[in-house]
Amino acid sequence: MYLVVFRNRKRASIDGEAYAEQAAAMEELASRQPGFLSFKSYEAADGEVIALSEWQDREAARRWGRLAEHRIAQADGRAHWYSEYTLFGCEDPRIHSFKFGDEQ
């Protein structure tokens, strides 16, 4: 598995409706890409957003990053939506899990 963590802050002056429309389109497009596993996004009280996407492998994530429609959205992000962002790519992350009720 390859995990992509996208931390960002949006500009105060963005067109929220246009952003939401493009974000929804990108999420739907990503979900149709070979190697896509999941996507979730969380917003903290201070406005920082953490978006997590899981991919089968690094190459699948890189193909997504190079897809023409996604490249346009990336350029829009720099030009219109984000005041800052950081992208982390994590290959073969260590995974520990717990689920209540699974104790034996």
Image: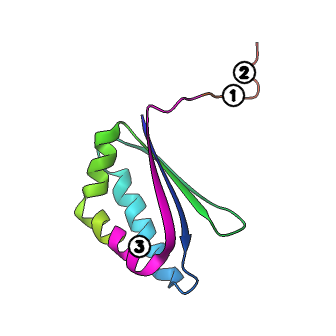
Q: Are marks 1 and 3 in contact (CB under 8 Å)?
A: no
Mark 1 neighbour class, 10 Å CA radius: few under 14, some 14 to 19, many 20 or more? few
Mark 3, secondary structure of its residue: helix
Mark 2, secondary structure of its residue: loop
Task: Tell me which segment is drawn in magenta.
Answer: 74-95
First in sequence: mark 1 vs mark 3:
3
Q: Where's residue 60, x and y in %?
A: 30, 43
Dot label at residue 53:
none
Dot label at residue 98:
1
Q: Which residue is mark 3?
A: 77
Disc 2 marks which amino acid?
Answer: Asp
Q: Residue at x 56, y 70 (%)?
A: 9
Q: Is residue 79 magenta?
A: yes
Q: Are marks 2 and 1 in contact (CB under 8 Å)?
A: yes
Q: Is residue 25 magenta?
A: no
First in sequence: mark 3 vs mark 2:
3
Q: Nearer the viewer, mark 2 or mark 1?
A: 1
> Residue 43, relative to residue 82: is it above or below?
above
Q: Nearer the viewer, mark 1 or mark 3?
A: 3
Q: Residue at x 39, y 59 (%)?
A: 28
Q: Which residue is mark 2?
A: 102
Numbered-mark total = 3
> Residue 58, relative to residue 40: is it above or below?
above
Disc 3 marks which amino acid?
Answer: Gly
Q: Where's residue 17, x and y in %?
A: 50, 81
